């Protein structure tokens, strides 16, 4: 994640099909690093788009994305996951629903 963005990423949502693991979770939202948003921007997007997200948890996820390349930011029903992914993609983040 860059300190100050000079360009903006095109919103991108990637849908991936998979098989259920039997854990009762239907989908997860994965966010990928794009080096075009500040931590503050990512934290704000997470807090606005993800139910129950706190600034502290959002920072932890942003750090993980920045240092590991991606992170699962939501697990739950597919409809909610798709709605969250759409909101995050609209904010310019690279996301996938798995």
Image (cartoon, helix red, strand yellow):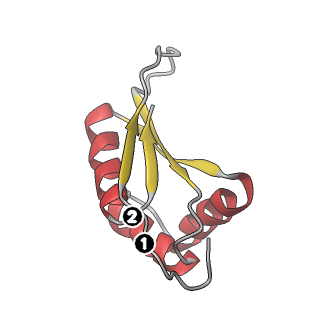
| Residue 4 to residue 91: above or below | below
* Within-10-Å neighbours for mark 2: few <14, some 14–19, many 20+: many
Residue at position x 43%, y 64% in the image: 9
Check the picture and name the quadrant holding the C terminus.
top left
Quarter-wise, where is residue 64 in the image? bottom right
* Residue 76, numbered circle: none
- Disc tally is 2
User: Where is residue 54 shown, x and y percent of the image?
Assistant: 49, 68
User: Where is residue 28 shown, x and y percent of the image?
Assistant: 45, 37
In this view of the protein, which residue sits in the foreground, 71 or 26? Answer: 71
Which residue position is annotated with label 2? 92
Q: Nearer the viewer, mark 2 or mark 1?
A: 1
Mark earlier in primary sequence (2, 1):
1
User: Where is residue 49 shown, x and y percent of the image?
Assistant: 34, 61
Q: Is 48 left or right of 32, judged from the image as shown? A: left
In the structure shown, which secondary structural element does the residue marked by tag 1 occupy? loop
| Residue 28 to residue 91: above or below | above
Marks 2 & 1, CB-CB < 8 Å contact: yes
For the question of whether residue 51 can be seen, the reply is no
Which residue position is annotated with label 1? 8
Q: CA distance from mark 2 to mark 1?
A: 7 Å
| Residue 84 to residue 36: above or below | above
* Farthest-out residue, right: 67
């Amino acid at each position: 994640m860059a300190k100050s963005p000079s360009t903006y990423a095109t919103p991108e949502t990637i849908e991936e099909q998979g098989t259920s693991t039997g854990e009762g979770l239907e989908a997860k939202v994965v966010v990928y690093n794009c080096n075009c948003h500040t931590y503050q921007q990512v934290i704000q997007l997470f807090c606005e788009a993800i139910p129950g997200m706190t600034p502290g948890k959002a920072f932890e996820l942003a750090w993980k994305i920045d240092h590991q390349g991606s992170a699962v930011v939501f697990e739950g029903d597919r409809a909610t996951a798709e709605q969250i992914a759409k909101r995050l993609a609209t904010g310019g983040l690279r996301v996938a629903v798995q």
